[in-house]
Structure formats: C-alpha cells, structure tokens
Amino acid sequence: MTHLIPPPLREAPCFSSQIHCVALAVPDELDSLEALRRQLCYQERRYWDAPIHEVMAAIRRGEVRHTRILGRQGGENKLVRGFYTEFFARLKGAQTTPGANQTLFIEKFAVGTKYDATLFADTTLGNEIYRATPAELYEDGVSTFYATTYLKKTEGNPTGNTTVSSSTTTVITVASATGFVVDGRIQVETANNTYNCTVSAISGADLTVTDITGGSLSGAGAFDAGDIPQSGDTVKALHSEAACFLGGATTSSANTGTMMNRKRIEQLKDSSISLLYDYILACASLD
C-alpha cells in the first residue's frame, strides 16, 4: 500500500516591520546625503551611476571616507490600528476615490522623546519633537519596502541637554529641566560610566530616574553608591520613539496624519551626530 505524505504546511504571509538607526560621525562638509553620495562616487568609480539604494547601503556599511559608524540599533515595532483601518478601507473599496487619510503613501518619518510602551491603539507619538519627509522610498521588487530618512547634525536634536547640579542615587538635580519629559529616556555621563535612565517624575529641576542601565547596572532603580552623578556631569535627552505617518492629512505639524507604526528606541542625537533612520516593511519575517 502506498502512503501519500502530505506536503509541509507553509506559514501564511504576514506583515513584519522594523525601524533601524545608524549613527554616524560625519565631517561638517559631508553632512548631507548628497555630499555623502558625491564623496562615495569620488572615491569609488562603481558608485558613479549606482542607484540611490546601493549608495545608501554603502553609507550604512561605513564605506564613505572620513566618516565612521558610531552605533546601530533597531528591531521589531508595532503596526498600529490607524494603519489597518485605512488599509482595510482601501481593500473594501469604501470610496471610488480614496479619502485623504486612506492614501497609504508615507509622507513623514518622526521621532520623539517619550519612552512609553507601544500599543495597537496608538494614534500619535507621546512627545514628537521632529519630523521629515523620507529621503528615499525603495522596494526590492520581491517583498520588502524601505523608507529612509537622514537627519543632519543640526536636525532633530532634543532641547534638554544640560548638566548635573547635585544628585542622590535616584534624583538628579539639573541646571535646567526644560525639554525633559516624564517617561523619557535620558543619558547621564559620569566620570566612570555612561548610563541610560527613564525619567519617572519631574519636580522643578529635580529628575527622578529609574530603570538605569550602564556600568554594572541593568534595569536598576538607583545608581551605584560609588558612582552617583556629580556636579557638571552631562545629561542628555534621547530619541525615545519613532514612527511613520501616512495619508493626505499628514503635514509638517507634529502628529498629523495616520500613524503607521511606533517603535521605542534609545538613540543619542546631538549636534555631533548624524542619523540614518530606516523604516522597513516586509511581507515576511525580518528576523
């Protein structure tokens, strides 16, 4: 008797999305995508006529002379309810001509400073500070779409950089609390270590911090007694959230349009750093 072996089950296609960020040290004269592209073409003949996505890939690899990669981060993020609402409206043919918010074109990429948990019901960032039109929209012709945004040294810098006046193991008194928000992530640079912390409360110039990572700490509620921040130590607000906004209602104003996704991040951004943000959407796993 012949036994037929059923074919293996295939996983159903699914949407998967990520936001990746590459931090760059770039000379002032090269601090734009066009300047980086010119430098790459000057030093490598093969990039003279290359499509922009290949040039972007070379920049991400750190191939542009006189620049260096400071760090990378990224990972899965949530596609949120607003995106699905508009997407399904299009699929149902709800209107012959799509309404403004049913336009699925990605208009803006945005960052903020609030490190809230991301929820499916989210419609806005917690504290958006900067948005820009993606510099490149590219799809590989198979299953993956990229929206890339370049932030120059002068762009997207949080306003909260300050210094420590005094500190305990859980409360940092700063010269100015302007620009810091509750649930935002901050970076504190002591003589021995660099720490990332969550601001759990703000009272005048006092920042209460928790979930401290860095040095020997991992999610600690307090600084090590031997490494409490001292007067003059630097305190910087971090990029703590990012998202794409789509639809015809999207403008340059914060949180306008339909938010497609939201991602918690911990990315330092100041006037010494340029950032290359990639939003990646695929109909397969990105793992």
Image (spheres, rainbow, N blue to C red):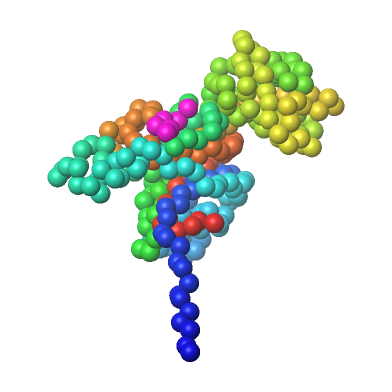
Q: Which residues are magenta?
A: 121-126
Q: Residue at x 23, y 47 (%)?
A: 92
Is 222 left, or right, of 269 in this rendering? right
Reply yes or no: does residue 24 show up in magenta: no
Q: Position of residue 208 (x, y in %)?
A: 67, 19
Farthest front residue in view = 1
Q: Residue at x 37, y 57 (%)?
A: 139
Above-or-below relation of 123 to 14: above
Reply yes or no: does residue 124 show up in magenta: yes
Farthest bottom residue in view = 1
Q: Position of residue 37 (x, y in %)?
A: 45, 53
Farthest left residue in view = 96
- Where on the picture, by quarter, is residue 196? top right
Q: Position of residue 198 (x, y in %)?
A: 63, 27
Q: Is residue 267 visible?
A: yes
Q: Residue at x 62, y 23 (%)?
A: 199
Q: Main secondary structure of the magenta part?
A: loop
Give the camera-side residue of 190 and 127. Answer: 127
- Where on the picture, by quarter, is residue 195? top right
Give the camera-side residue of 187 and 94. Answer: 94
Q: Position of residue 239 (x, y in %)?
A: 54, 33
Farthest right residue in view = 226
Give the camera-side residue of 154 and 257. Answer: 257
